Amino acid sequence: MIADSLQKVIYGFSWYLDIVCEDWYALVWPSATDYKIVMPLPVKHKYGFPVLYQPHFCQYLGIFSNNNLTERQVVTFLSACYSHYYYISSYSFHPENYKTLQMSLQSLANIKYVVNTTSWLSLDGSENDLAAGYTYDRKYNLKSGLQWSWELGKSNDLKPIIELFANNHASGIEGGVGIGSYKVLEAIFTETQRRKCSELWYAKQGDQIHAGILLLKEANFAIYIFNAANDTGRIGNARTVLLDHYFTQNAERPTIFDFESPQVDSIKSFYRSFGGDEIPFITIEKTSLPSPLQQLLFLRRLLIKAKRDLYGALCKILDPFRATRS
């Protein structure tokens, strides 16, 4: 059904949900054996109760349908979901749900939500049209990056990009990155390679890989799911060169490229510099737990923050020692 839906995206397929979710269910209509509307629900269990959450490597889900959704249908699905779970850490709806969902939320004042954005770039223009959409800074950085004469190539080896990320980016992620996340990414890559719907590109200097990008594609929709670079890759604008190379290869095709923008201003600004459009989507949240459980969750957040602050302090202490050894 997902394959024929108006909201078709790789996140919604059952095989993808099986990889990224601890467990998942779905609201369907009109029946479990003949459904035309589906809302996948990723669930994990904490302290003995189910939690609706947004899994890693799954930017949004929402309501999938073969026909345009009515406001009444959206209200019904949204109300059923929201009333069933005491705790929704976050649940994001496909951007195609945005307009109808926004109208529906006006009649559901009890639902807490935020509007997030991602960046979509249409690749249906010519190479020149796409390049003309870059900001001045992006054009300058691309020109600078091309002077590094990066060797670009596809690969079926995920290990280098994971090592690049672990060594150069993981420390900046709130709460850190567990080994389980890398295992999920490896499972995604294995399955999408088998299905021929992923591309992994690296930028090299000699035998040394300095940057990589991983893309997922389903029909006419491509997702920038994962990327990493070391200091050399960043200085040499390797990821800009890699992305420009992909856009050039896929110019004049009816493809939407989703940068899967995190809600971080500096990163969003970088993605928008390629000329894409800022696309809104809605994320709902809910905390309706007994007081003792709410206190446990609050303490857990404090512990995560304390660990992060301690790690930052240790890095500042160690930096002078690293400088003397370099």
Image (cartoon, helix red, strand yellow):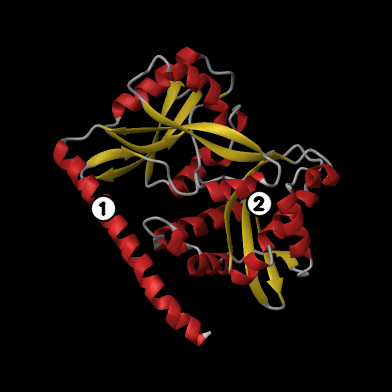
- For residue 260, side relative to residue 184 (left or right): right
Numbered badge on residue 196: 2
Callout 1: 10 Å neighbours few (<14), some, many (20+)? few
Whether residue 35 is visible to the viewer of this picture, yes or no, is no
Numbered badge on residue 302: 1
* Residue type beneath disc 1: Leu
Residue in the picture at 34% in, 61% down: 308
- For residue 242, side relative to residue 231 (left or right): right
Residue in the picture at 39% in, 61% down: 178
Numbered badge on residue 280: none
Q: Which of 48 and 136 lies nearest the eye of the viewer?
A: 136
Helix, strand or loop at label 1? It is helix
* Residue type beneath disc 2: Lys
Q: Is residue 69 above or below residue 204?
A: above
Residue in the picture at 57% in, 39% down: 118
Q: Is residue 170 above or below residue 19?
A: below
> In the image, residue 77 lies at what x, y percent?
41, 22
